[in-house]
Image: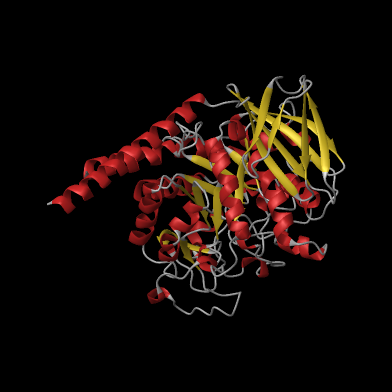
Amino acid sequence: MKKITVFLITFLLLSALPVQAAVEKKDRAWQDESVYSIMIDRFNNGDTKNDIDTNAKDPHVYNGGDFQGIIDKLDYIQDMGFTAIRLTPIFDNAKNGYHGYWVNDFYKVDEHFGSIKTFQKLVKEAHKRKMKVLIDFVTNNTAADHPWVNDSSKQDWFHKKQDINDWNNQVQVENGWVDGLPDLNQDNPEVKEYLIDVAKWWIKETDVDGYSLPEVNHVPLSFWNDFSTEIKKEKKDFFLLGVMSEKTAIDLNKYHSAGIDSLFDYTQSEKLRKAFETTNQPFSPLNPAFDSSQKPSGLMANFLDNEYTVRFTKDIVDKRQFPGSRWKTALTYLYTTPGIPIFYYGTEIALNGGEIPDNRRQMNFRTEKELIDYVTKLAEQRNQLPSLTRGTMEVLYDKGGMVVYKRVYKGETSVVAINNSTKSQKVVLTDEQLSDGKELRGLLGGDLVRSRDHQYILITDRDNSEIYVLTEKSGINISHIASVIIVLILVFIFLFLIIKRSKNKVIE
């Protein structure tokens, strides 16, 4: 009897699975990742023992976030569908260097964040969850009081102190001091060798999967050529993500050619922010970025805000819009267009914030889950549909704040409809745009659109989005009906045996 019960439960569970359950992608590439970006000090305090000179009420000093705090929240991050985390620099910093960019020792972990053993544990725990780990690797400068600054034998390790007056002058950008920080001279062979050696050491010691490179455009391309070549020998598929300075517009292709795999593009980010901070904005400024003839040769890192910018939530509030709706619409676009979405911590709760350090507020885990649930649903589709991460992109409709585009990869076609307007929108797609005689199955809201008279008619409510998959018309599912009949027969047999057994007990 117990065996029959177990069999029935197993069969019922299996029969309840979707007929076309998506299969997890094999051979995951970096373009398939979605990155949760964390400022360590502001995320979560998991170990109060390393709270040295911290003050959680002062945004200019250490607040208490640490490695253990991130370990404690890895399941939280994974449950939202993220496949990688990016951390601000972990190296030992000068006083009040909570952000990690005032490096005093490249070979030591900042004592406020924990020990190197705890960081190694963090990487291992992330890898157990099939999540990759990137850390910021500072190459442009050191802390103002770094021991090298007053070392007479290392004066040529730095450029002479000078301000950057013209941000379009690459020589000034590469040689000038940013925020008064001593600017490293990467043309010096000793400096180059030191930075490459320390970068290799951290890979060997911790098994991190990539480096994000702050102020990548402040460092000569010749350095990045040598750095990328040497670093990528240490670990297969090691990833280099360049973080540009906001003030400079440059040719991204040059950095891709130098071995930088992906880059933050502030120009595209500004366009994204303007398109989604309020309604009825045109999509046309965004779409050319994904034209195969114009996009950079490497992967794009798509983002709305980060540790250097004002929070996108502030833009939304300044426009007197509701953050939840604006974020949902913007993230749908971010998650379904070519490139890697970089998601700044706190976005899932629409965290607000102005200029630095206000944009680096502490994370709050006691909030409503509506936006978190939506992010999770978006990630589920992105993680299961190769067309959303590897497919071509073609805009099918773009008018009045409504956009529809399709992504195609190896026979799989996804269609994304985003209504960023103040009214419901109707879009008619023809059999020239999509294969005739099929149906579009909605994965976010469950919408179903069947081909009729060689057309697909999409109706999308205001401030709403849908991700469709183009499939054969469902019709009558014989196999599903058969499985239901078999389950019913087994249930009747099960009940019959129970009744019979009960009668036998009564007779005894």
Instruction: Give x and y (percent) for residue 333.
Output: 70, 43
Q: Residue at x 40, y 46 (%)?
A: 203
Instruction: Give x and y (percent) for residue 23.
Output: 47, 33
Q: Name above or below for residue 251 compared with residue 154.
A: above
Instruction: Give x and y (percent) for residue 284.
Output: 83, 38
Quarter residue 307 falls in: bottom right
Q: Name above or below for residue 50 compared with residue 486.
A: below
Nearer to the camera, 307 or 303? 303
Q: Residue at x 67, y 34 (%)?
A: 253
Quadrant holding the N terminus = top left
For residue 14, say whether it is visible: yes
For residue 185, say whether it is visible: no
Q: Is residue 423 left or right of residue 240?
A: right
Nearer to the camera, 410 or 14? 14
Nearer to the camera, 497 or 248? 497
Q: Residue at the front extreme?
A: 507
